[in-house]
Image (cartoon, helix red, strand yellow):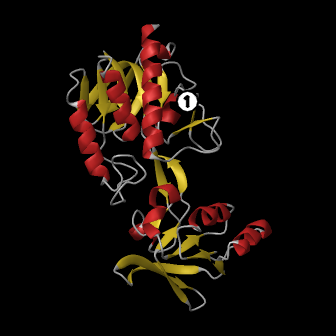
Amino acid sequence: MHDVIIIGGGPAGLQAALTLGRTHRDVVLLDSGVYRNDPTDAMHNVLGFDGTPPAGFRDAAHRTLAAYGTVELRRTAAHEVAPIDPAAPAGGFVVRTDAGDVTARRLLLATGLRDELPATPGVAELFGTVAAHCPYCHGHEFTGTPVGILGSGPHVARVAGLMERIASRLVVLADGGDLDPQVRASLDARGAEVRAAKVERLEPVTLPGSHPGARAVLADGTAVELGGVMVAPTLRQSAPFAAQLGLDLRESGCVAVDAMGRTSVPGVFAAGDLAHTADFPMPLSSVTAAMAAGQMAAVAADGDLLGA
């Protein structure tokens, strides 16, 4: 039986494997090869890797982990997790994968979230390049261009505040929705243009200067060309393991954890954007936050094993 199974080969899982490898824990990292940042051509706001394709970051991480003999990377998908003894979860866990069963004394989930995008035609094709959800991760790439904000929810005002220093102008695509009066007042104060009509589709275009962009075609017969479009996906767990283990969730739908990544089930830890501490208003969707959480959860799992 291994010391720890880590499910998920993104930043949180990779950092957790490194931390445990450095204390010579017997670790198996299960990597399905599917990642939340697959749609993007480059990751940003990661010191030393700003502008690096996500695959390049993972390749560098894999080379680093290869130096640690107690860490094994298995490129296989996990499908089911369960305690070996349901009456004593901390006694160990079994993970069923495409390549067979794996057992370990502790389990660390780093499977992340998936983005359920707005149904507007064209959003999915542009997501990760011209369409994005995080101003900190992708906003700078839209510098000096008109930027659209799709939707009419409360998020619109905050995104407008984050993007006003970056965009040449702000265009809120309310998509047929009604803006709250306070949101509308905030947008007016920032000089944002509001297009109330339903968005029929987004089309790729090339703006002056060969800048990639999008044309928003509206139901009122008008269209607007934009250098970027900020969208607000609905977040879903990308794997069924929280439900299989009966882990407590927060209102966000993410696994409830403490600052060290401990979940409600003894012996199970979680890190990355699938997890949510009470100290934060939302799960943190960034590479650096995921790495920090992966390190903390690994330290907690290691300490838990010391006391076993």
Q: Nearer the viewer, residue 105 or 204?
A: 204
- Residue 199's spot in the image, x, y percent? 56, 79
Quadrant in which the C terminus appears: top left
Q: Amino acid at mark 1?
A: Gly
Q: Is residue 163 above or below residue 192?
A: above
**Circle 1 is placed at which residue position?**
246
Q: Residue at x 38, y 40 (%)?
A: 11
Q: Assign a secondary structure to mark 1.
A: loop
Decide if residue 239 is in sight here.
no
Residue 105 visible in the current orientation? yes
Query: Which residue does the image show at 35% across and 22% down from the upper left?
Result: 20
Q: Position of residue 306 (x, y in %)?
A: 43, 9
- In this view, the residue in front, 108 or 162, is 162
Residue lying at 36% horizontally and 25% vertically, measured from the top left: 19
Q: Residue furthest bottom?
A: 221
* Side of 278 relative to 289 (left or right): right
Q: Residue furthest right?
A: 181
The quadrant of the rendering that contains the N terminus is top left
Answer with left or right where residue 226 lies relative to residue 68: right
How many marks can you see?
1
Q: Give the quadrant of residue 189.
A: bottom right
For the residue carrying disc 1, how many other residues have a C-alpha within 10 Å: few (<14), some (14-19), or many (20+)?
few
Measured as percent of width and height from the top left, residue 28 is found at: 29, 26
Q: Position of residue 167 (x, y in %)?
A: 53, 72
Rendered residue at 62%/40% (across/down): 280
